[in-house]
């Protein structure tokens, strides 16, 4: 590879990439991952980790955990996907993105094998991340699952703790079309003897997790049965949350998050239980450090796109919500905001349950239908037609930039513009 840009071109164009083309890039086994890691000298065995899966909230949860370990003085790796703006966002140590030189050298080293086994983009980037964490000698890495769990390339690690945030409908074409089936795939990250935190107890999925944990002799806790949110207050750029561990009034803690989405209350409970379990394993995570870290997750880790206000008068908000459950949470948030008219810039990918999402969206908003510049995006005219049939009114725009520009021009000072429906639409903004 002559330069970094050519290395990226190779990664993005030569390797099948799920975020770009969808299911054709998904590898339903760990064969390539095992070949790649063997070639790289099994870097996944050289650092400690926390493994985070779930339908929604796994990105926010991973970033919160990374912020806490970082603030506690641990050298902390963070692997997440997809990226919004820069490929290197996927792989960070102490909030700093992976060096371009490392990316180039790794791809150069792995390329002869890659050319012979045809791995996916994700398979290569996971091993790149693990190799980087090993080389950087991190104290711990927070590793977010890409898709599912059982057959995800990240599932070659033996973590200190497994975390599954929640289960709802997404990627049904690959993971199954019932909640227990999807839970079964996510439960694939539960390992022998490794404690596991499940964020939300649901009657349909709890038995799946309990059975798998029993098989693996893995201690299991449901985060929302250990603590509960007694009160919260939304403050535009922050969320103040009161958490109790028992019905006794004195047993309450107060947290201020710089992630203002009210759906973060669920993630906070998951994070607090994870911290509690890691503390019991000897990690020094003082309560004061946890409070301090949660106030500045974005600053410490560079997280974006979670109820993020990027403009005022009118308010323009970015949120990566893209499935039924995510959109439901987003609509709850919109109801809390003080606004006049609502404008929604919406783009989706073609393998989502689009009709389910459209049925949830408010009829009284003005819509600006668009598409991200990836092959997997649903054409804006198709989206507009389906939305029209669902009773939503708006126009189609060929680019995200144009859709946002028109929405901004139409919105009055006290209106609200929300950009959602796809990580890739948010990424373009």
Image (spheres, helix red, strand yellow):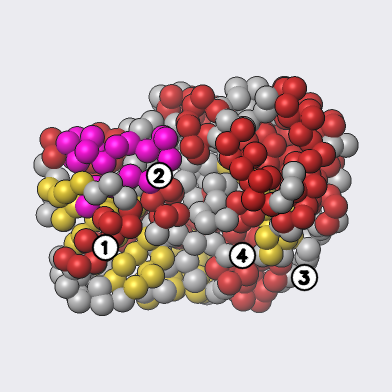
Let me know if residue 424 is in the magenta part.
no
Q: Earlier in the sequence, mark 2 or mark 3?
A: 3
SS at circle 4: helix
Q: Earlier in the sequence, mark 4 or mark 1?
A: 4
Crowding near the residue tagged with mark 4, few <14, some 14–19, many ≥20 C-alpha atoms within 10 Å: many
* 229 vs 238: above or below: above
Q: Is residue 171 left or right of residue 276?
A: left
Give the residue drawn at x 41%, y 35%: 376
Confirm or deny contact between disc 3 and disc 4 (CB under 8 A).
no
Instruction: Point out the stretch of residues depicted in magenta.
Output: 368-387
Placement of the N terminus among the 4 image quadrants:
top right
Foreground mark, 2 or 3? 2
Q: Residue 87 placed where, x, y %?
A: 60, 51
Placement of the C terminus among the 4 image quadrants:
bottom left
Q: Residue 27 placed where, x, y %?
A: 60, 25
Q: Is residue 337 left or right of residue 365?
A: right
**Mark pair 4, 2: CA separation:** 27 Å
Q: Earlier in the sequence, mark 2 or mark 1?
A: 2
**Mark pair 2, 1: CA separation:** 17 Å
The residue where tag 4 is placed is 301
Q: Is residue 419 left or right of residue 60?
A: left
* Numbered mark located on residue 405 in the image: 1
The residue where tag 2 is placed is 373
């Amino acid at each position: 590879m002559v330069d970094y840009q050519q290395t990226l071109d190779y990664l993005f164009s030569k390797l099948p990439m799920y975020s770009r083309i969808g299911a054709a890039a998904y590898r339903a086994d760990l064969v390539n991952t095992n070949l790649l890691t063997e070639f790289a000298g099994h870097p996944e065995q050289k650092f400690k980790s926390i493994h985070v899966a779930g339908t929604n909230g796994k990105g926010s949860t991973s970033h919160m955990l990374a912020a806490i370990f970082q603030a506690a003085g641990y050298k902390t790796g963070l692997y997440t996907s997809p990226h919004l703006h820069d490929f290197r966002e996927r792989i960070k140590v102490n909030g700093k993105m992976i060096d371009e030189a490392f990316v180039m050298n790794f791809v150069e080293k792995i390329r002869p094998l890659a050319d012979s086994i045809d791995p996916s983009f994700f398979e290569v980037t996971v091993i790149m991340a693990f190799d980087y964490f090993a080389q950087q000698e991190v104290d711990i890495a927070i590793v977010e699952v890409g898709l599912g769990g059982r057959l995800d390339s990240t599932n070659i690690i033996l973590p200190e703790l497994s975390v599954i945030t929640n289960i709802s409908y997404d990627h049904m074409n690959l993971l199954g079309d019932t909640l227990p089936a999807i839970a079964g795939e996510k439960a694939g990250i539960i390992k022998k003897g490794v404690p596991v935190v499940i964020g939300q107890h649901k009657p349909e999925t709890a038995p799946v997790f309990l059975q798998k944990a029993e098989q693996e002799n893995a201690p299991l806790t449901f985060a929302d049965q250990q603590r509960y949110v007694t009160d919260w207050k939304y403050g535009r750029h922050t969320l103040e949350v009161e958490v109790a561990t028992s019905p006794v009034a004195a047993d309450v803690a107060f947290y201020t998050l710089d992630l203002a989405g009210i759906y973060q209350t669920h993630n906070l409970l998951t994070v607090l239980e994870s911290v509690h379990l890691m503390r019991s394993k000897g990690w020094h995570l003082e309560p004061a450090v946890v409070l301090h870290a949660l106030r500045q997750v974005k600053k410490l880790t560079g997280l974006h796109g979670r109820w993020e206000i990027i403009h005022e008068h009118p308010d323009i908000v970015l949120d990566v919500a893209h499935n039924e459950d995510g959109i439901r949470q987003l609509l709850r948030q919109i109801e809390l905001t003080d606004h006049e008219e609502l404008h929604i810039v919406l783009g989706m990918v073609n393998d989502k349950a689009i009709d389910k999402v459209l049925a949830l969206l408010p009829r009284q908003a003005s819509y600006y239908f668009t598409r991200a510049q990836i092959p997997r995006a649903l054409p804006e005219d198709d989206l507009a037609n389906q939305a029209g049939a669902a009773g939503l009114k708006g126009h189609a725009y060929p680019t995200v930039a144009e859709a946002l520009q028109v929405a901004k021009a139409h919105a009055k000072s006290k209106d609200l513009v929300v950009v959602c429906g796809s990580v890739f639409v948010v990424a373009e903004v």
